[in-house]
Amino acid sequence: MAGIQEFRIVVLGSLGAGKSSYVIRYISDHFVEEYDPTIEDNYRKQVTADDEPCLLDILDTCEHEEEYRALHDQSLRNGKGFILLYSVTSRESFDKITVWHTEVSNIKLRMDEDTFPFIIIGSKCDLDNERQVSKEEGEELANILECPFFESSARDRINIDEPMFELVRIIRHYYFRSK
């Protein structure tokens, strides 16, 4: 299909935060209870967002070891939109969101790019009895970082499509509409 817009989306977060479960649920509408982490997994899906077709190229990253730093940095350089994902059951994963945000921002600014859309997702919202991070804390961080916020559950299929479509809207605004 000629002229279809392609969106490179990079999903970042701590090991065990639910990145792969979220991405696999979005791509195949299947919930994966256990996932064997790899360095990176790439998924492609053609969707229609706001009545316009697009191809999503989604990179599911893993917390990187130093020997994979070059691969990781290249992935961040190529991204057009970023999902910063933490688990509501892990304060540590939430605290790392600002680290991921700073890392992407620094790489993009070195490339003289001033546009790099983010959204924040608090995953595993179905595990309310294990919650360590309140919804209000997630919303407050998103306000500070000036990006949309969602809580999701891959298991219960809560807020799986909406965050991706919101990120597509933001990418379209910055990369395609403003030029």
Image: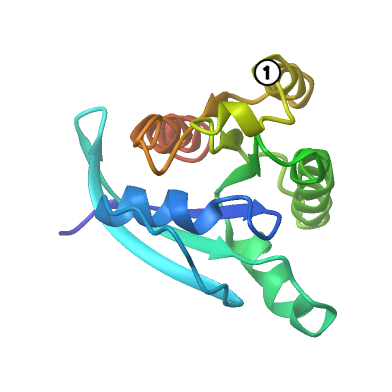
Say which element carries label 1: helix
Q: Judge left or right: residue 8 versus residue 160.
A: right
Residue located at (66% from left, 39% from top): 115
**Crowding near the residue tagged with mark 1, few <14, some 14–19, many ≥20 C-alpha atoms within 10 Å:** some
Could you say which quadrant of the image residue 37 lies in?
bottom right
Q: Residue furthest left?
A: 1
Q: Nearer the viewer, residue 123 or 103?
A: 123
Q: Residue furthest bottom?
A: 67
Q: Nearer the viewer, residue 154 or 62?
A: 154
Considering only vertical position in the picture, is 8 above or below 175? below
Relative image position of residue 169 (x, y in whole percent) = 42, 30
Residue under numbered circle 1: 139
Number of marks:
1
Could you say which quadrant of the image residue 110 lies in?
bottom right
Could you say which quadrant of the image residue 114 lies in?
top right
Q: Judge left or right: residue 25 versus residue 20.
A: left
Q: Judge left or right: residue 32 versus residue 9.
A: left
Considering only vertical position in the picture, is 61 above or below 48? below
Q: The N terminus is located in which quarter?
A: bottom left
Relative image position of residue 121 (x, y in whole percent) = 58, 35
Relative image position of residue 48 (x, y in whole percent) = 22, 39
Considering only vertical position in the picture, is 2 above or below 150? below
Q: Nearer the viewer, residue 56 or 42?
A: 42
Q: Callout 1, which amino acid?
A: Glu
